[in-house]
Image (tube, grey):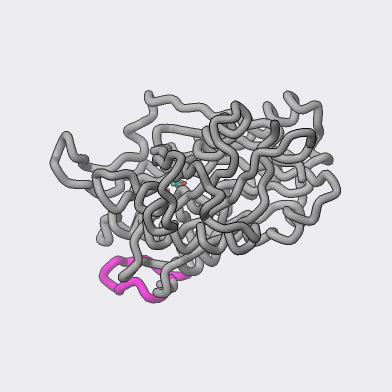
Amino acid sequence: MNSVPIGLGIATPKKCLKNNDFPPGLATSDEWITQRTGIRQRYVADDETTATLATAAARNALDHAGISSEEIDLIVLGTVTGDYTFPATAVIVQKNLNITKGVAFDVNAACSGFVFALDVADAYLKQGKATCALVIGSDTFSKILDWTDRSSCVLFGDGAGALVLQARKNTDRGLISSKIYSDGSHMDHLITTGGVSTTGNSGVVKMRGQEVFKFAVEKFSESLDELLKNNDMTINDVDLLIPHQANARIIHKLMESSGIEKERVSINIDKYANTSAASIPLALHERKNAFFSGGGRNTVLLSVGAGFTWGSVLIRL
Ligand code: ACO
């Protein structure tokens, strides 16, 4: 049994915040943000929430797949900015789509949320525990940013992306391999200042940027090498590389170390900034036609996030 992607959808808030829109008091500039990160703008939730964005992305993915929500019996949603402490944002999406069967739950892996969700959904489908899954990454970091901290607030944006995965027998196409990791010894490098059981509120993002940068460069490269080795591939066999969009300089370092050229790498951090769990499906959507064009094309997803968490996925379509 293989998990085969059959539809992809995204959603972003309406409001777009360009680098020049930050107030003068923040002491930042379009030049600094663009040069250090590659970011030019980001979308920021106004009346949208993590669940409404996730639902919109899911509807778009179902439309693209040409199936109705009745066929979905699993929703796995990566987020760290859920609408409520409970229930899970995934069950809100389930309700919004009028699905009353199967199971829906969230996974918390920050920017690795989508890759973790894919890994979990794939296991369910391969074991026959579900037949058709919505795998969603949705985050509204704008709600947990300290808008007076220029070293973090300029880096993030809001958005959602969803992939429909169908369990299919007798095919060598679909999700070929996935591997996820975490190491909590680095948790303090990227963390919120609170939580339900500590301060009683969500807190705001605090980040040691350079430590995160170094870790991301190292893990991207390590994860890619491991994926290629385990699947008996070289970098020349990778048709599309979809890295988490945290900083264009991190992605450029990966391109240098792996030797992959920009035509095969999706970079859209200029448009969306770092959208956490939504980042990989948003970057995948940029290459949607190529991804679904068939012919045994290999797509590699790479993630790094708070925790630290990291992981890789190989999809062959
Ligand atoms: N505008 C202007 N100046 C700034 C800004 C800003 N927005 N932010 C920081 N600076 C200043 C600093 O104060 C510092 O000034 P100083 O030299 O006078 O002390 C100077 O710029 C250089 O700061 P650095 O931190 O050394 O800048 P660096 O080149 O390392 O870039 C950045 C910082 C962009 C945060 C980088 O380290 C980075 O991208 N790190 C990774 C972040 C990341 O990936 N986060 C998400 C992880 S995924 C997840 O799970 C959420």
Camera-side residue of 46 and 269: 46
Viewer-nearest residue: 176 or 34: 176
Q: Nearer the viewer, residue 246 or 116?
A: 116
Residue closer to the observer: 82 or 185: 82
Q: Is residue 88 left or right of residue 175?
A: left
Residue 222 percent coordinates (x, y): 63, 29
Residue 257 seen by the camera: no
Q: Is residue 261 left or right of residue 152?
A: right
Q: Residue at x 74, y 55 (%)?
A: 292
Q: Give x and y (percent) for residue 248.
A: 57, 54
User: Per the image, is 22 magenta?
Assistant: yes
Q: Is residue 65 visible?
A: yes
Q: In the rendered view, does 30 fall on the left or right side of 197? A: right
Note whether 193 is above or below 265 in the view shown.
above
Magenta-highlighted residues: 19-30
What residue is rendered at 73% in x and 49% in y? 240
Q: Residue at the spot x=49%, y=53% of the render?
A: 278
Query: Which residue is pictured at 76% across the width and 28% down the height?
Result: 231
Q: Quadrant of residue 270?
A: bottom right
- Quadrant (top left/top right/bottom left/bottom right) for the N terminus: top right
Quarter of the image where one finds residue 143 = bottom left
Magenta stretch holds residue 36 = no
